[in-house]
Amino acid sequence: MKKLFFRLPKIAILFIFFIIFLTSFMLSISVGKTAIPVSTIIEAFIDYDETVTEHIIITTSRISRTVIATVIGASLAVSGALMQALTRNPLAAPDIFGINAGALFFIVFSSVFLSIASLVHYMWIGFLGAGIAAVLVYFLGSLGRDGLAPVRIVLAGAAITALFVSFTQGILVLSEQNLQSVLFWLAGSVAGRSIEMLLPILPFMAAGLIGALLLGRSVNIMMSGEDVAKSLGQRTVLTKAVIGIIIVFLAGGSVAIGGAIGFIGLIVPHIVRGIIGIDYRWVIPFSAVTGATILLLADVAARLVIMPQEMPIGVMTALIGTPFFIFIARKGLSRNG
């Protein structure tokens, strides 16, 4: 794949990726139980008519769903790229940090014991759970004289993930009647989410994306090794802490809104590094655009595969991500990280 683009400057490749993203964005608005032509989509934005059914569908559901999928896809991909850099583990993803598991446990706990059933409440509870899980992982990974170490933080993440997953399974076994109320969220979905749900948490995710873009050079230095980074004047502990906070904002916010959507944070950084290399000044913006595109296309496929019903987008990303993960593992692309 890299050979297809090696003669083009990176900015030109990014422009091509952005065009593909815009096409996917329009496709997401167009495709569904009611197919809407592009001309009608444009008309809905330029000259909205509340008597036209297609215009109502676009403004009340399609556009919010598409925007949310874009934000989540970009955030998960960038958080995955940062996780892989922070842990120096090419298989790192939000699952490694226990973010998914933490958010999941807090939502199930609130549903069963606090009788909460609101998606908006789930969003904030999930964000809180993701943050707490990340803090626990960071604390456990920092124990010892050497401070935060890649291997230690991976082991801490695995332990916290196992702990929260066990607690969640135990609660659901004891209270099966509450499973249905959180089932679609557990599988991952952007259906039924409104822009109003995204807005309260959007500043955190926007700050995370901007911070990630600004940290590209620092991540490059950190990737060169702890001793080299310190010799170049980098405050490595502070850099790692800032990266950890950004990961919580991006991955935690995504899980809180869309649920357990897997594989985007894992596979997208591999795709990007396979095309443009390991310079994180470029990996981060490419990951954002590519992650948004893949999640939009996965959401479109989720609407079509068992129409008129929908498959949870988390299931669709797993179907897409699993064979790709096997492919990159066999080809050794993980060494690019």
Image (cartoon, grey):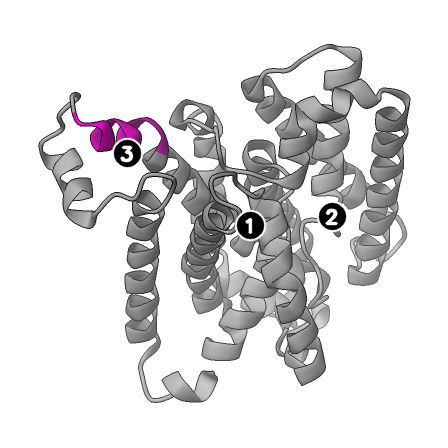
Q: SS of the residue at dot 2?
A: loop
Q: Quadrant of the C terminus?
A: bottom right
**What are the residue bounds of the magenta stretch?**
52-61
Whole-number angstrom distance, CA of label 1 to CA of label 2: 13 Å
> Which circle, 3 or 2, is nearer the viewer?
3
Residue at numbered disc 2: 97
- Asked if the magenta segment contains residue 117, the reply would be no
Q: Which is in the foreground here, disc 1 or disc 3?
A: 3
Q: Residue at x 20, y 41 (%)?
A: 41
Figure check: 307 above or below 18: above
Q: Residue at x 13, y 28 (%)?
A: 48
Left or right for 152, reference 29: right
Residue 173 in picture, x, y percent from top left: 89, 27
Residue shown at 70% from the left, 41% from the top: 100
The x, y position of residue 120, in whole percent, is 54, 20
Residue found at x 49% / y 44%: 72
Q: Amino acid at mark 3?
A: Ile
Relative to residue 305, is residue 328 depicted above or below? below
Query: Does the image show residue 233?
Result: no
Label 1, label 3: how far apart the Cα atoms are: 25 Å
Instruction: Give the quarter of the image for residue 34.
Output: top left
Residue type pointed to by label 1:
Leu
Q: Nearer the viewer, residue 51 or 292?
A: 51
Relative depth, front residue between 26 and 131 = 26
Task: Check contact, mark 1 vs mark 2: CB within 8 A.
Answer: no
Q: Residues within 10 Å of mark 1 (few under 14, many from 20)?
A: many
| Location of mark 1 (residue) | 76
Residue 114 placed where, x, y %?
75, 10
Q: Say whether disc 3 or disc 2 marks the residue closer to the N-terminus.
A: 3
* Residue farthest along the top direction in this orientation: 115
- What residue is shown with label 3? 58
Give the secondary structure at mark 3. helix
